[in-house]
Image: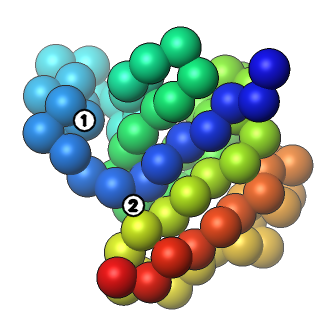
């Protein structure tokens, strides 16, 4: 089963982050969301068996860093 992380900040993530200090939260069985990715974010996603990250923002994509963790990074500029 393919796991996907969508890196946009949503109210669900903000609430989860405030409670757990976790950058990544699970929205459904196969979808996670989170804010601006860091090394810690990529490590969390790898541990959760995520294979693809979809980033929807104006920030520079972190393709090389994601690749170090075996993650495919798709950037959709906003």
Is residue 18 visible in the rendered image? The answer is: no
Q: Position of residue 66 (x, y in %)?
A: 73, 60
Give residue 47's quadrant in the image: top right
Is residue 36 positioned above or below 25 on the image?
below
Mark 2 Cα shell of 10 Å, populated few (<14), some (14-19), many (≥20): some
Q: Position of residue 9 (x, y in %)?
A: 26, 52
Q: Which residue position is annotated with label 1? A: 13
Give residue 19's quadrant in the image: top left
Residue at image position (34%, 55%) is 8
Residue at image position (44%, 18%) is 28
Q: Position of residue 40 (x, y in %)?
A: 55, 43
Q: Earlier in the sequence, mark 1 or mark 2?
A: 1
Asked whether the residues under the numbered discs 1 and 2 touch, taking CB atoms below 8 Å apart as contact, a structural biologist would say: no
Secondary element under disc 2, as helix, strand or loop, is: loop
Which circle marks residue 36 in the picture?
2
Mark 1 Cα shell of 10 Å, populated few (<14), some (14-19), many (≥20): many
Q: Residue furthest top?
A: 29
Is residue 40 positioned above or below 62 on the image?
above
Residue at image position (55%, 42%) is 5
Is residue 51 positioned above or below 78 on the image?
above
Is residue 5 visible in the rendered image? The answer is: yes
Location of the C terminus (image quadrant): bottom left
């Amino acid at each position: 089963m393919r796991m996907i992380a969508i890196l946009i900040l949503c109210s669900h993530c903000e609430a989860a982050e405030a409670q757990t200090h976790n950058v990544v939260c699970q929205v459904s069985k196969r979808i996670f969301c989170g804010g601006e990715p860091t090394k810690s974010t990529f490590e969390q996603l790898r541990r959760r068996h995520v294979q693809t990250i979809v980033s929807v923002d104006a920030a520079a994509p972190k393709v090389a860093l994601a690749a170090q963790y075996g993650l495919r990074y798709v950037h959709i500029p906003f």
